[in-house]
Image (cartoon, grey):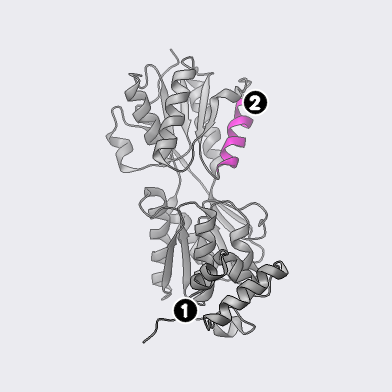
Amino acid sequence: MRERTTIKDVAELAGVGVATVSRVLSGGSASPQTRERVLAAAAQLDYRPSALGRNLRKRRTGGIGLLVPDITDPFHSRVADGVLACAHSAGEPVIMGVTGDDPESESEVVGMLLEQGVDRVVAVPSGEAEPWAPAVRAGLTVVFAARRTAGYDEIPAVLADVRSGMRTAVEYLVGLGHRRIAYLGGRGQAEPVAAFRDTLTALNVPIDEELIVFGRATRDSAYAAASGLFQHRPDLTALIAGDNMLGEAAVLAANELDLRVPRDISLIMFDDVPWAELCAPPLTVVAPPARDIGYRATELVLRGGGRRTRAVRLPTELIVRGSCGPCR
């Protein structure tokens, strides 16, 4: 028996992305040439979309789609655990897709969820707007978790209160006498960077743009960013890492460069993971409620997204351990 043709097969034959096929078949915008290639490929393969037609709403099969960048990441796995727990209590199946924080992969997963007739989606988005255009046009109920996507402020989101968490972390370090404080950030971290700058300004601490550094979403990139920061700015006395991967990179780079924590450098990490307590000394962290974020986002998507709800912010907690000390 011949396997059913998928939207990915059409995309490969037409030489376009899955998101483009979704857009064309759902009546969205595309150039005449692109539209012709997609429709010709669909006809050649006898592709019969299960959810991307004029009867899209009637053909939906229910269920919840879940998109996360990396299921092995402790933060995202706890978000997923919250989604699964809430969905299970509601008797809803969950279809999970891993995007790798890559917009093209995100587009493919969104297209596949549309094809399978999923009604609702909870997603930790990459931050790019284009992957979500087909889902919005198709009328899916979408709730973002942990992050937002520029251009889609109307989509509800459940977030950690990173501004409050950042303010608490910076105030704690400044209270210990630190003035040369670095921030090591990653993708989708515009809000904590703004909070970092705002808090320094409010505390009359000069902002040094050289101490605000970003790494890409890989361990090698995070390590290179942390190591480069420590080597090029030996005068810095404290660092705040924007997530657990960046925190891990900062710890490894400090050890490699024989920087003693907290005597030479004080460290704070956003996110609390088991290994943070096993460091020597244990890491001070700003702990976001990752599982609660996933659970609340699923509650919201099951209620239809909540027309008046645009952002639910859950409190973070500063957990003081041994990785911060008085400025040298």
Identify the element where label 2 is drawn.
Answer: helix
Is 199 contained in the magenta span? yes
For marks 2 and 1, give the one nearer the viewer.
1
Q: Is residue 13 above or below residue 252?
A: below
Spatial CA distance of label 2 from label 1 is 57 Å
Instruction: Give me the residue at 48% from left, 55% from top.
Output: 293
Q: Which mark is residue 104?
A: none
Callout 2 amino acid: Thr
How far across and how far down the image is residue 27, in percent? 68, 75
How far across and how far down the image is residue 70, in percent? 41, 53
* Residue marked by disc 1: 5
The quarter of the picture where the N terminus appears is bottom left
- Looking at the image, tell me whether mark 2 or mark 1 is earlier in sequence order: 1
Instruction: Give me the residue at 56% from left, 65% from top.
Output: 15
Q: Is residue 29 above or below residue 146?
A: below
Callout 1 amino acid: Thr
Left or right: where does residue 201 sit relative to residue 269?
right
Identify the element where label 1 is drawn.
Answer: loop
Instruction: Give me the residue at 43% from left, 55% from top.
Output: 79
Q: Is residue 65 visible?
A: yes
Q: Which residues are magenta?
A: 189-201
Q: Which mark is residue 201?
A: 2
**Residue 288 sits in which quadrant?**
top left
Q: Residues within 10 Å of mark 1 (few under 14, many from 20)?
A: some
How far across and how far down the image is residue 326, in percent? 43, 17
Q: Is residue 208 above or below residue 159?
A: above
